[in-house]
Amino acid sequence: MQELDVKINESLEILIENELLIGYELRSMLKIFKEEKKVVGYSFGKLCYWHYESFTDFLNEDIYKVAAAVELLILSFDIIDDLQDKDSDYSWTKTPELSLNVAIAMLVMASRAIRETSFEHKSAAVQILEDYALRSINGQQLDLLNSCSDEQSYLQMIEQKSGSLTAMGCLIGEVLAKGESSSEVEEYGKYIGIIQQIKNDIQSLKTWGSKNDLLNKRYSLPIIYLLSQKNDVSKSVISYYNEDIVTFLDNNATENELTNGGAIRYAITIKNVYKFKALSILENLAINEVCKDYLIKLMK
Amino acid sequence: MINVIQHLEKNPELVALLKEQKASLIGVSAMEQKAILEAFNSEIELERDVWN
């Protein structure tokens, strides 16, 4: 675990331990869920920290508490998403009713934690947290409706669902340091979320299991490409999606078409477009090298 | 973008011409063209790192 992850993790532990209004049952579940999150690292909290550090002259140690608050919100969204999609095996999926309650508690604790810090611009930070959380919830609603079946509507949906959350992390750090946020940071912040979502979408098609978007009749860029083709495989996938006839998919033929027919390449191309857009904004921004390196890794 | 990729998949010789800067795609920006070429260059990586 990197030093910054350790700091954010410690702040999360303190936040959970010091919340007096929750009892043992809720607290113990919060701790368990937080431990599971620790394994994947705290990318959103780190986006917040690095942007704060890049734009400030004086480091207020409360920034770790804010980064932990951002992570609490992200974890609550992850839990809710998993409960809605029913495609994960994290411990929170075992007791959905209780886990939903934990997620609601996390949401409230996130904005409360920022309000309790000593930052001059904490109100602006809470405002960003609430605005971008709502945008993400709106994107999630569109995703659940599964109606974004063309390139433009799909990209708009993931910009709201995923791009809002990465932008939120960056902007909270920036506003705490400067008292204002910039359209440049918002823009590349959104692009990072879009890039990561496209990578997840490609990954989801890797195995033919419960997480496979195609088997679940969900839309993503490679699937939108596949459905636009006029060959036997795409015709069979269209029938499978339309449910007009009982269709058995030939997994090998479908996988071959996705890999060699251009679907994955198309998704990678769109991802690359966002990468180059993000890099060109980043190029002209006065930001420290550690932050820049971290962002570039997330843009690839 | 779907149509562009589809067209290039069917006409791989065009990709070679694009790489050599002997052709260009009408209605596609320089940044998009760069994104396309990088995607066509990442075939081996795609097989190894992303897909398998």
Image (cartoon, coloured by chain):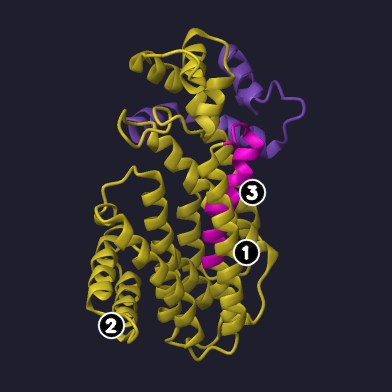
Q: Which residue appears at 55% of the width and 57% of the height?
A: A136
Residue with the mark numbered 2: A17
- Which mark is in front, 1 or 2? 2
User: In this view, which residue lies farthest toward the top?
Assistant: A232
Q: Are marks 2 and 3 on the same chain?
A: yes
Asked if A244 appears above or below A153 in the picture, the reply is above
Q: Is residue A156 magenta?
A: yes
Please provide percent x and percent y for residue A218. Answer: 47, 33
Identify the chain drawn in purple: B
Residue with the mark numbered 3: A277
One can see residue A227 in this view? yes
The image quarter containing residue A57 is: bottom right
Asked if B25 appears above or below A26 in the picture, the reply is above
Q: Main secondary structure of the magenta part?
A: helix
Please provide percent x and percent y for residue A45. Answer: 43, 69
Q: Earlier in the sequence, mark 1 or mark 2?
A: 2
Which of the labelled discs sits on residue A185, or is there none? 1
Q: Which residue appears at 60% of the width and 19% of the height?
A: B6
Identify the chain drawn in yellow: A
Please provide percent x and percent y for residue A8. Answer: 35, 74
Q: Is residue A247 magenta?
A: no
* Contact, mark 1 vs mark 3 (Cβ under 8 Å): no
Q: Secondary structure at mark 3?
A: helix
